Amino acid sequence: MTRTPIKDTFLKYSHECGKGEARRESRLTEGELLEAGSAWEERLRDCAGTVNVFLASGTERKIECVRVGRAGYCLSAAFLLDKSLLSKLIGYMLERRFDGGGWADPEETAWSLGLLSQMINGNRGGFEEDHAWLSEVRFPCGGWGHHSRDQARIPATALVIALVPEVATEVDWAWLRNEWGRDLERPVKLSYKGGFYLLAEKRDAETTLPDTTIRFLEQDQNDDGGFGPWKDHPIGSDPWSTGVVLWGLSRWIDRVDRSVVERALDWLEKTQLPSGYWPYHYLDEGTSYALIGAVSALKALQRL
């Protein structure tokens, strides 16, 4: 297998992790999140314990990189990724990376790159081949889908832009705005698509669409405080939709009604299982999104 810059960078870093070097102490707060003893700190630590075990067992069972990257990224964003797993996770991700760049699909590549960059404290160097691969599989209209036979989709496109911003172009943002703008005119509007749009849109974009989306989401919140695919959907509120919406709204916290975010956090707090997971048909996926949504919202509220 050809050695590439990203492999050299992370193999060296993996060796340093094995010696206990080059990584800050894992912790919940960095002057940004919570005060010790708060209810949310306890809940996030319960989640972290469960998800760290999931990562350790998942790498042994050789689960998909998208699941490892997603869970690991969300834990790392909360400063709760078990540092003893770093070397194992780096090796696991690199062993499954394709020669020439990229993982199985754009979403898996985005989560994988997001996690790897988090694990070396935000250093985004050495990813050139992966960026090139993502550029190659971009649709001519802009944006990304699940695979080459798919079509461009809002969730996949937003994740690539948010987690790998180096590859985003004006064509991608234009497609995203057009697609979500059309969705907003339809009778059924999916709340999670609005959350993904806000996650990826540029803060300085010359468009009123972010504010329109924020007002839509504020009105689309369920009475219990959570979010579902849409207001009063038969399945009710779910942690996946609630997490996505919180993640997106948190980037625009200065324009959002604070009570909307607080009610969604309350819903997540009340619905977490004793195991630390949130109930969803794919436990690790729903829990990962609930975690990143909660952490992003808590950080954003403290910045107000």
Image (spheres, helix red, strand yellow):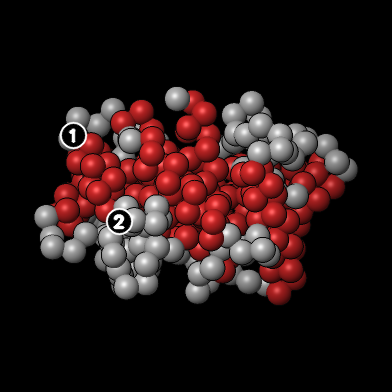
Q: Nearer the viewer, residue 145 or 48?
A: 48
Tally the numbered discs: 2
Residue ID for mark 2: 191
For residue 189, say whether it is visible: yes
Q: Residue furthest right?
A: 19
**N-terminal-most mark, 1 or 2:** 2
User: Residue 221: horizontal and vertical position, in percent?
Assistant: 32, 53
Residue ID for mark 1: 207
Left or right of 74? Residue 267 is left
In which quadrant is the N terminus drawn?
A: bottom right
- From mark 1 to mark 2, how far is it between C-alphas? 19 Å
Which one is closest to the eye, mark 1 or mark 2?
Answer: 2
Badge 2: few (under 14), some or many (20 or more) residues near its Cα, within 10 Å?
many
User: Residue 285: horizontal and vertical position, in percent?
Assistant: 53, 64
User: Residue 31: horizontal and vertical position, in percent?
Assistant: 64, 26
Q: Residue at x 54, y 68 (%)?
A: 279
Left or right of 104? Residue 274 is right
Q: Secondary structure at mark 2?
A: helix
User: Residue 245: horizontal and vertical position, in percent?
Assistant: 38, 50
For residue 157, say whether it is visible: no
Q: Nearer the viewer, residue 241 or 143?
A: 241
Left or right of 75? Residue 157 is left
Q: Residue at x 53, y 60 (%)?
A: 271
Q: Residue at x 31, y 40 (%)?
A: 201
Q: Secondary structure at mark 1?
A: loop
Badge 1: few (under 14), some or many (20 or more) residues near its Cα, within 10 Å?
few
Residue 203 in the image: above or below residue 2:
above
**In the rendered structure, which amino acid carries the disc numbered 2?**
Ser
Q: Residue at x 43, y 63 (%)?
A: 238
Q: Quadrant of residue 19?
A: top right
